[in-house]
Image (cartoon, rainbow, N blue to C red):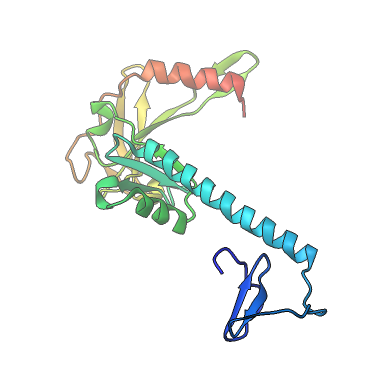
Amino acid sequence: AAGAVVLTDIPDNCTAVGIPARVVRRDGEKVQDLDQIHVPDPVSQELCRLRIEIEQLKKEKEKEMIKEFKDFIRDQDTFFAKPNHGSRGQGVTRITIGDYQLPEEILRFVRDRNITVLEHTLKQHPDMAKPHPFSVNTLRIATERVGDTVYVPYIAVRFGRGGSCCDNTGQGGMSCCVDRETRTVRHLAMDDSFDTFASHPETGVVFDGHPIPMLDEAIAMAKEAAMVIPE
């Protein structure tokens, strides 16, 4: 019968009802004799009830998850997905929402790869994006705190390469030194293989003298962070 939870095989030509299911009709006739062996087990009944309740909670949680995900991707063309633990840009993926028909398909893709961190795509300053517009190009501001004073020993900027969404040198990116006084890139870029580049090999943008926007604001933010988390 509908709604019955079957835990054991039901004989042919029998009707079973209940949780757990028990035979009430055999060959169209109502079963009169009480089965002293297969009497209802209250423990099994409670386990069945809990199992049904858990499955219902899972379904409700899944509905909530899909709703939250739809809200997350609303009005977005792309977003970034990456594992919770990793280094050198490994596992970072830029997902184009238009490549999928349904949000559920994107969510399945993310789950199948054990990706746990989703981030909206941020619009970069044109000067940061220009050398390699396909990647998230970032500053690396080293800080050293001595008492209540924070020093900045060096600043580097990284740019991606090869259409990668990452600027990490481990993913083919390259790194340049930044001149704090002129707020520009200094000299050449270098990759993980110690190869040097005067300009980006794909866009042709010359590195030496390339402007680094909002550098003072970035330094101030790094110093503020160093006062809170000095390590």
Q: Is residue 49 left or right of residue 66?
A: right
**Can residue 125 be seen by looking at this rendering?**
yes
Q: Position of residue 80 (x, y in %)?
A: 37, 42
Q: For the view shown, which residue lies furthest in the left direction?
A: 204
**Can residue 193 be seen by looking at this rendering?**
no
Q: Quadrant of the C terminus?
A: top right
Q: Quadrant of residue 184?
A: top left
Query: Between residues 230 and 37, which one lies in front from this camera angle?
Result: 37
Q: Residue at (35%, 16%) from the top-left corner?
A: 181
Q: Is residue 102 left or right of residue 218?
A: left
Q: Position of residue 83 (x, y in %)?
A: 49, 49
Q: Residue at (19%, 36%) from the top-left corner?
A: 205
Q: Position of residue 158 (x, y in %)?
A: 35, 37
- Give the vertical position of 32 relative to 204 (above or below): below
Marker count (numbered): 0
Q: Quadrant of the N terminus?
A: bottom right
